[in-house]
Structure formats: structure tokens, C-alpha cells
Amino acid sequence: MIKTNWRGVATTDLVLEILRLKYDIDMLDIAPEEAIGFGRPSSYGDEQWILEHRQLFNRQLQDVLNELERRRTINETYVKNPDREIIQAIKERTQLADIIEQYTEVFYNGKDRWKFRCTLHGTDTEPSGVIYNKEQRWWCFGCNKGGDVFDAVQAFERIDLPSAIRKLANKLGIELRPLTENKKRMGINV
């Protein structure tokens, strides 16, 4: 099964997807003759088909719920630090390949193409991860994880988002105090 990337999907669509998946899970408990348009292939036994689809729907539901939880964490972080400019500055001042290289072996293939041996899913004999430097994104085809520089620090260090932001800010010498507070402290009217 290919894992769906829910990052670019609107929150409204995520909520609708949760409702659809819950409906599909509920439909598994209905007798086949009562389910209109939810037919089971004749090649499967009813119990096998139900079990496989229940697992599939539950996995998809968990992925969508994980994405919503990730967004809640980001929103909570921005409440503590509302200046998105600071987050953007961290992203602009870091090179993703340099950050990932701190955790695993990175290879340059030419034409701004980078690969890495992902240690998140065990030992990697061949590079299974790709770094898209221009977009500042990474993806591992072995464990289906990826994201931006904050996601990389979170995944490799097994820490939460606020800790990853603090770690990168400290490394770059960026103060995490909101910009409006800094301006007031310096006597600038906001």
C-alpha cells in the first residue's frame, strides 16, 4: 500500500476524509445484501476481505489523524512564538543536506541532487532517501517519512517540534523571542 501524503491537503478535506473512512469502517459491519454499492469481490472470503479492509481503513484513518495532530502541534507552537518570520529565517539559513549529514551519510549526485542512507528504518545498504535542496524537502522511500528541516530534526532526534525549533535556532544564533517583543524592548513603536 502506498502511503498518502496529507501535508498539502486542506484541513476541511482531512475532516471529510475522516468521516468517509469512519463510514467505510461502519459499512464493513453491514450484511452484504444490505450494503448498496459496497460490494465485496467474490474471490475473497467475507471474513478475509473484511479483515483486510478494516486494517487498511484504520491505517488510513490513523495517518489522517496524525496529520491533524501535527498541525495542532504547529499551531500551539505559533501561539507560543507567533512570529512566523523567525521560523522562515531558520528555514532559509539552514541547508537541509548539512542538517541530515549530522545524522547519517549523505551523497552528492550532481545537479543539486542529494541522497542519504536513512537510519530511521534500520540499516540502509543503498541510499533510500532523497534531499530536494531547492525545495528544502526530504523523503525516504524506505520508511515513507519526509518533510522540511524541522521534520528531519524531529525524526532523527526523536523530539517534538518546539524542541526541534529551539535546537535549530540555538545552532544558528537566532533568538526565539517574538519579534514584536524585541522591538518594544529596543524602544521601537510597533
Image: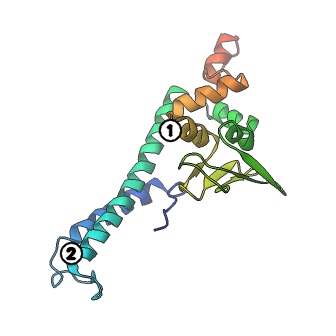
Residue 58 rendering spot, x and y as whole percentages:
32, 60
On screen, 126 above or below 32? above
Query: Would you identify the image quadrant in which residue 112 lies?
Result: bottom right
Report the quarter where the N terminus lies. bottom left
On screen, 74 above or below 4? above
Q: Which mark is residue 95?
A: none
**Colour scheme of this structure image?**
rainbow
Q: Residues within 10 Å of mark 1 (few under 14, many from 20)?
A: few
Residue depth check, mark 1 versus mark 2: number of the one nearer the observer = 2
Q: Residues within 10 Å of mark 2 (few under 14, many from 20)?
A: few
Specify the farthest residue to the right.
111
Q: Is residue 46 left or right of residue 146?
A: left
Asked whether residue 104 is in view, the answer is: yes
Residue annotated with mark 1: 74
Residue annotated with mark 2: 47
Residue 138 rendering spot, x and y as whole percentages:
65, 51
Q: Secondary structure beneath disc 2?
A: helix
Seen from the viewer's position, the closer of residues 138 and 80 is 138
On screen, 103 above or below 137? above
Q: Secondary structure beneath disc 1?
A: helix
The residue drawn where x is 55% and y is 34% is 157
Seen from the viewer's position, the closer of residues 124 and 59 is 124
Among numbered discs 1 and 2, the one appearing first in the sequence: 2
Q: Amino acid at mark 1?
A: Ile
Residue 123 rendering spot, x and y as whole percentages:
58, 49
Query: Would you identify the image quadrant in which residue 64 lies?
Result: bottom left
Report the quarter where the C terminus lies. top right
Label 1–label 2 contact, CB within 8 A: no
CA distance for labels 1 and 2:
41 Å
Q: Amino acid at mark 2?
A: Glu
Residue 168 rendering spot, x and y as whole percentages:
65, 29
Asked whether residue 82 is in view, the answer is: no
